Amino acid sequence: MLKLSSINKLISFFEQYKLLQYKKRAMILHSNDSASSIFFIKSGYIRVFRISEDGEELTLTILKEYDFFPLTYGFNNNEVNNYYLEAITHLELWKAPQEQFMQFLKKDSELFFELTNTLMLKFDGFLTRMEYLVFNNAYTKVVTTLLMCAKGLGEQHGDEIIVKIPLTHKDISTMIGITRETTSLEMKKLERKGFVRRSGKFLIINNYKLLEEEAQHSMGLEEISPPYLL
């Protein structure tokens, strides 16, 4: 999580560029598009995903307010984007030239260090998530993915956490790499056990701590590493 002072610095930089708006489910970038700009989100959510040769989608992460993308090609000067970016909700973002953004960071070593550290934390969280997804069954994959969404996208209300974006069973399945039908079966198990419920289009975690204990029990562990990716 970036410090407020760092967020304000980024806003001040990006505000010199035009604010772009996208409708829900609009495509922001396609794989193999030219990677010459940095996007900084003012409001809304973006899904970052890949598509396999068989046409299967895998959601890698979800970007939210004050995230920017693609961070890696901003640092290593790649010329081609390798991912698809889709607006999950109505979206507002700024788009700045990559070269100007890097010049801006080079003038502020403290901000550059903080952004680099944030990238490393996200990468560590990505590795943890991959471990959960590779070595566990479908039920555990769904549970740990819900924990990730609650932590990264949730809003606390007492013991409950409301995931602030509309997530369908298909959306969840693309985060895990299993079928929508299997995801639906595992979600019904969690609903029957009282861990989650729906309120309109939003998913509610009834008690984060109890769901975390369920994940520990399903993996036979005394504790689990935080499945942070978002």
Image (tube, grey):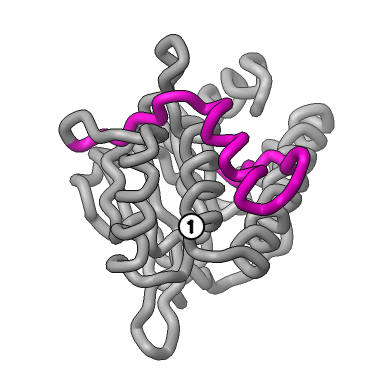
Which residue is label 1 attached to? Answer: 139
Image coordinates for residue 106, horizontal then vertical, percent: 78, 40
Foreground pick, 73 / 221: 221
Give the residue type that dot 1 points to.
Tyr
Location of the N terminus (image quadrant)? top right
Q: Is residue 220 magenta?
A: yes
Residue 63 is left or right of residue 71, and the answer is left
Image coordinates for residue 143, horizontal then vertical, percent: 50, 47
In the rendered view, tell whether residue 26 sits above or below residue 116: below
In the rendered view, tell whether residue 140 sits above or below residue 103: below
Q: Is residue 15 visible?
A: yes
Question: Which residue lies at the image location 27% right of the left edge and 41% below the top edge?
Answer: 166
Q: How many marks?
A: 1
Location of the C terminus (image quadrant)? top right
Image coordinates for residue 70, horizontal then vertical, percent: 56, 55
Instruction: Provide the secondary structure element on which disc 1 rests.
Output: helix
Foreground pick, 111 / 164: 164
Q: Residue 20's quadrant in the figure?
A: top left
Dot 1 alpha-carbon crowd within 10 angstroms: few under 14, some 14 to 19, many 20 or more: some
In the rendered view, tell whether residue 105 sits above or below residue 69: above
Q: Residue 202's quadrant in the figure?
A: top left
Residue 80 is left or right of residue 2, and the answer is left
* Residue farthest left in this picture: 200
- Residue range of the region highlighted in magenta in the rendering: 201-230
Image coordinates for residue 80, horizontal then vertical, percent: 54, 73
Q: Is residue 108 magenta?
A: no
* Residue farthest top in this picture: 158
Question: Which residue lies at the image location 21% right of the left edge and 29% below the top edge?
Answer: 199
Foreground pick, 179 / 47: 179
Q: Is residue 106 visible?
A: no
Question: Which residue lies at the image location 58% right of the left edge and 28% below the top edge?
Answer: 10
Question: Which residue lies at the image location 47% right of the left edge and 24% below the top edge?
Answer: 207
